[in-house]
């Protein structure tokens, strides 16, 4: 028997039938908080500085951009894996992703589907592209204008907005990809 087979006296039977639910949103927020902590820990501890400097000196801005995009892609994979695991633990797997006839939502085959993975990759890639484009075009002037002490706050704000945009796009893309 899965969570979808039981009727809760407190929660409606449609809590996992919509586009998303509280368990899924909470799982994504927790995954993003862990990512933010990891990113900021690595930034302040400095282990990636040597990699960025090496890329800048050996290949210039194009290699620096490639290394930065690669690291961001790794973080995207980390967020997605954590999100899927937390979502399962929170009981937030929507029925569109793991319908009743697919078995228990706790086991791996019921945790996600190919369309969902593609939807997340597409959403993450679009938002990452917009952020990287913005970083190359006008954000350096913003960072210079506000000074060193406030720059991390602007970076955090951009990360939060990017995470929200990624989740919103992901839900939209997932809805269309899983209907097919």
Image (cartoon, grey):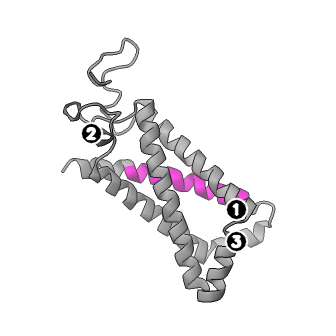
Residue 169 on the magenta segment: yes
* Residue span colored magenta: 152-170
Residue drawn at x 55%, y 41% is: 30
Q: Residues within 10 Å of mark 1 (few under 14, many from 20)?
A: few
Left or right: 106 in relation to 138: left
The circle drawn on residue 96 is 2
Give SS at disc 1: helix
Q: Earlier in the sequence, mark 1 or mark 2?
A: 1
Residue 166 on the magenta segment: yes
The circle drawn on residue 49 is 3
State the image coordinates of residue 143 (x, y, percent, origin top left). Answer: 72, 69
Residue drawn at x 30%, y 21% is: 13
Asked if the residue under mark 1 is in contact with the one under mark 3, i.e. CB atoms within 8 Å, the reply is no
According to the picture, the residue beneath numbered tag 1 turns out to be 43
Marks 1 and 2, Cα distance to the nearest angstrom?
38 Å
Foreground label between 3 and 2: 3
Q: Quadrant of the N terminus?
A: top left
Q: Earlier in the sequence, mark 3 or mark 2?
A: 3
């Amino acid at each position: 028997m899965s969570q979808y087979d039981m009727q809760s006296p407190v929660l409606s039977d449609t809590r996992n039938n919509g586009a998303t639910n509280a368990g899924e949103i909470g799982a994504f927020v927790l995954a993003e908080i862990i990512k933010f902590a990891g990113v900021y820990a690595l930034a302040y501890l400095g282990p990636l500085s040597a990699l960025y400097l090496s890329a800048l000196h050996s290949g210039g801005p194009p290699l620096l951009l490639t290394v930065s995009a690669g690291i961001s892609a790794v973080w995207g994979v980390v967020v997605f894996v954590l999100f899927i695991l937390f979502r399962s633990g929170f009981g937030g797997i929507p029925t569109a992703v793991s319908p009743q006839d697919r078995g228990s939502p706790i086991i791996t085959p019921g945790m996600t589907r190919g369309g969902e993975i593609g939807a997340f990759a597409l959403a993450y890639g679009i938002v990452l592209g917009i952020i990287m484009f913005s970083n190359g075009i006008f954000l350096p002037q913003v960072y210079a204008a506000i000074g060193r002490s406030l720059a991390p706050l602007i970076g955090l704000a951009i990360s939060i907005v990017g995470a929200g945009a990624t989740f919103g796009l992901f839900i939209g893309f997932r809805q269309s990809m899983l209907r097919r």
